[in-house]
Image (spheres, helix red, strand yellow):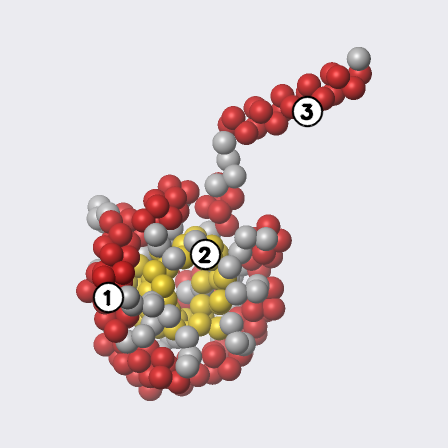
Amino acid sequence: MKFFIDTANLADIREAQDMGILDGVTTNPSLMAKEGITGKDNVMRHYKQICDIVEGDVSAEVLGTTFDEMVREGEELAELDENIVVKVPMIKDGIKAIKYFTEKGIRTNCTLVFSAGQALLAAKAGATYVSPFVGRLDDISTDGVALIEQIVTIYRNYGYTTEVLAASVRHPMHLVQCAEIGADVMTGPLSVIKALLNHPLTDIGLAKFLEDNKKAATK
Ligand code: G3P
């Protein structure tokens, strides 16, 4: 399973990269705004900085909602760095843009996916990744992990190569459940990745090992 970090925070990206387990980064306009990154030049510079830190795919989202706008923005983003994946919303013009990018060899991430039918469209357009939002479905009392399972099954039925990127992963059990189902990628905040480290028996066991070693050394 690939681990992507869902943030535009450079310190968090560096920390995840330093752990040696990071496969890529996803961002969205809200995450960029959270870091105070606004204006085209600043946004482009920030994406380049992220690409310089990470050895892996970096999803950069278009802001346009028409085919022409998305194509113009996406082509500029793809020029920035070979690791840029153009993130395109699940709308009619978005599907058309994904198909266009696919034919041009530009990789895409189809975002804001909340149903299996939307995921099918993304795969048919040739998206590199599809991003179903697990947490946001859970927020409205709908089983987000079940959607991941449904999409994985459908893609396997037909051999689609689009990778299932479980997005809006909010806690470690989301991540583990998505891994059990066979999601290709998960993206979530650094806190979710770090939460995987935690087990009280690990802490108790380590403290005991160190204490026993200390006791033996002082005998
Ligand atoms: O980047 C898309 C998705 O991961 C957002 O997550 O937590 O804002 O629903 P969240």
Residue ID for mark 2: 2
Residue ID for mark 1: 158
Q: Nearer the viewer, residue 71 or 32?
A: 71
Q: Is residue 14 left or right of residue 191?
A: right
Within 10 angstroms of label 1, few (less than 14), some, or many (20 or more) residues? few
Q: Is residue 6 above or below residue 212?
A: below
Residue, x 48% and y 41% (percent of image)? 196
Q: Residue furthest left?
A: 117
Tag 2: residue type? Lys
Within 10 angstroms of label 2, few (less than 14), some, or many (20 or more) residues? some
Mark 3, secondary structure of its residue = helix
Q: Quadrant of residue 213?
A: top right
How far is disc 3 from disc 2 in space, using C-alphas?
33 Å
Query: For the C terminus, which image quadrant?
Result: top right
Q: Is residue 211 above or below residue 84?
A: above
Q: Is residue 126 above or below residue 100?
A: above
Mark drawn on residue 210: 3
Residue, x 68% and y 24% (percent of image)? 210
How far is disc 3 from disc 1 in space, using C-alphas?
53 Å
Give the number of callouts. Answer: 3
